[in-house]
């Protein structure tokens, strides 16, 4: 009796296992969270050690963020195609949701407006979701690109192209952020 064998290429390659997939999702999320937390801390402190917050952002936070898709891509190289897509989808969705929430908090219910905004916070939801999808989706797509290049054994090119692509995605997110910032006006009560 002949045993039926499954072609690994048709099945999406060998399965990585749940622990490896969890690590492949957790590492990029850890880098993303670390970049955000370090940015937030530097923003609160104004001066971090011998450098100001802008310098700290450029020498620590930005490189950490730019390496996130590289870390994601390299951690996904042993995954099958469906596992890689699932990991990218999970990472992209979580980063998109987190970005949208943080952005919504800053324009929908900003801390600098003592009496709230003129426009109700719910009206800012489509713009914040749009920016979140660009940031999370860009990170996920960039991670997929890095994983593809790393599988082709062009590891240095994967790092360089991954970082450069993330620079483009961040620039696109900033453009979207500036375009959607419209309408952020603080409510000022009339004088009594």
Image (cartoon, helix red, strand yellow):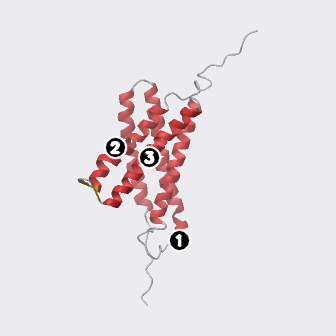
Mark 1–mark 3 distance (CA, rounded to whole Å): 29 Å
- Residue at coordinates 41% horizontally, 52% vertically from top-left? 37
Whole-percent x and y of residue 192? 43, 90
Q: Which residue, as the protein is rendered here, is positioned at the far right?
A: 1
* Residues at circles 1 and 3 in contact by the CB criterion of under 8 Å: no
Q: Callout 1: 10 Å neighbours few (<14), some, many (20+)? A: few
Location of residue 153 with respect to 161 vertically, above or below = above
Tell me where residue 116 appears, x and y as whole percent: 47, 74
Rendered position, 7 above or below 162: above
Look at the numbered disc 1 and give the secondary structure of its residue: loop
Estimate the spatial distance between the alpha carbons at disc 2 and disc 3, rounded to whole Å: 11 Å
Q: Which residue is mark 3?
A: 32
Badge 3: few (under 14), some or many (20 or more) residues near its Cα, within 10 Å?
A: many
Residue found at x 37% / y 44%: 64
From the image, tell me which residue sits under label 2.
Answer: 63
Callout 2: SS: helix
Q: Quadrant of the N terminus?
A: top right
Report the residue that reaches farthest toward the front: 49
Marks 2/1 in contact by CB < 8 Å: the verdict is no
| Residue 69, percent from left and from top | 43, 39
Q: Between label 2 and label 1, give the one nearer the viewer.
A: 2
């Amino acid at each position: 009796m002949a045993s039926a064998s499954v072609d690994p290429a048709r099945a999406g390659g060998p399965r990585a296992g749940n622990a490896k997939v969890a690590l492949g999702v957790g590492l990029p999320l850890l880098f993303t969270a670390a970049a955000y937390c370090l940015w937030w801390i530097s923003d609160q402190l104004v001066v971090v050690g011998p450098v100001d917050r802008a310098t700290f952002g450029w020498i620590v936070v930005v490189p950490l963020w730019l390496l996130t898709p590289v870390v994601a891509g390299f951690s996904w190289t042993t995954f099958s195609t469906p596992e890689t897509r699932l990991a990218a989808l999970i990472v992209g969705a979580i980063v998109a949701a987190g970005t949208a929430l943080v952005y919504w908090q800053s324009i929908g219910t900003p801390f600098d407006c003592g009496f709230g905004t003129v426009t109700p916070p719910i009206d800012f939801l489509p713009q914040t979701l749009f920016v979140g999808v660009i940031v999370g989706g860009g990170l996920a797509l960039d991670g997929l690109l890095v994983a593809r290049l790393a599988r082709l054994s062009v590891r240095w090119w994967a790092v360089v192209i991954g970082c450069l692509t993330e620079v483009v995605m961040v620039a696109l997110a900033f453009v979207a952020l500036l375009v959607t910032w419209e309408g952020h006006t603080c409510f000022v009560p009339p004088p009594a």
